[in-house]
Image: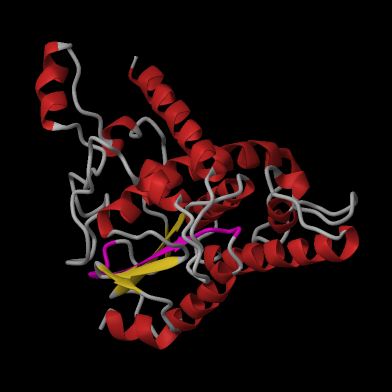
Amino acid sequence: MYQHCGKLLLAGLLALACLISACSFTDGSSGSSSSGLTAALSHEDTPAVAAGGGTANAFNPWMQKTLPNTRELSTDGKRMLPQMGGSASRIEEEAAYRAHWREEIYPVVFGNRQAPHELLVLLDFSNPRSETLWKQVMTASRSLDPSQCKIVVYGLNKENYGTDLMGMAIWISYERKGQAMAYLDYALSRWNAVKAGQKKARGKAIPFTNEYDATVKSTDFPIHYAYLSRLKPAVPASREMDITSYCYDAGSVNTYQAVQICRYYGITALPAVVADGKVLSSPSAEDMIKAVR
């Protein structure tokens, strides 16, 4: 019964991911007034719990028993739900049937998961600025003490294939520890390179709805398939289908939590970084280092 309910939650998360992917995001790099991300983060009955900074680790399931929930019911809803035999849902309860739910809602790609400081990095693979920001994150990591600061990654993607790629980062974070940051650098770089290649070859780039959209030639390997052989140890061919199937589900759970984090901190444009509860605007590596010291 519990697992069945969990699967219903996952179905909802998959639907949410699709809805978000259909939105037009504000990319933070222009004066666009697009309301796609804002609309995805809004909820008429449930305003965000808090906006702005405070402390680190609010969303860390290894350090907090109860996580912030920006999708709580209205006062009337809370009063009516018990009368209907229901109870308020929380992701840390409803996703618990998944073996790696903590890694999916809080994927640590650098540092100790119980380190006192944190950088939450929110990416949209379809925004070229995500690659630029990620390179700054990687530079910052070289000056961070992993026992004192961790880097956690979320994906909130305009194009569906970004959800698969985020899911792959989650899988690597616990199955091939220490390799997720390099993978993300590769995936973001390849995304932009494929877009450029499509524009050159076809005159325009297409939306990356699935892995085969993210190729220039029919003989190209999709981004995450191509990386499986680069991992150490490499993933055997017999496991590829199981892993890639897992990736979309994991990425969708991560998407749900990315929405929560954006609502909680008042983030309306991606990519973004939250350093110990403070949202940083287009941060450099130096900005990130200073913010967690």
**Which quadrant would residue 247 be assigned to in this image?**
top right
**Which quadrant would residue 215 be assigned to in this image?**
bottom right
At a point 30% along the width and 86% down the height, the residue shown is 290
x then y, percent, for residue 29: 52, 71
Which residues fall within the magenta stretch? Answer: 114-126
Relative height, residue 99 to residue 228 (above, below): above
x then y, percent, for residue 264: 26, 54
Q: Residue furthest top?
A: 84
Relative height, residue 34 to residue 141 (above, below): above
**Which quadrant would residue 273 be assigned to in this image?**
bottom left
Task: Answer whether residue 115 is magenta in the image.
Answer: yes
In the displayed structure image, the side of residue 150 where residue 56 appears, left or right: left
x then y, percent, for residue 283: 41, 79
In the displayed structure image, the side of residue 156 where residue 185 appears, left or right: right
In the displayed structure image, the side of residue 285 where residue 167 appears, left or right: right
At a point 26% along the width and 62% down the height, the residue shown is 114
Relative height, residue 41 to residue 133 (above, below): above
Relative height, residue 134 to residue 161 (above, below): below
x then y, percent, for residue 156: 48, 52
In the displayed structure image, the side of residue 208 where residue 170 appears, left or right: left
99 vs 261, nearest the viewer: 261
Specify the quadrant that holds the N terminus: top left
At a point 55% along the width and 44% down the height, the residue shown is 21
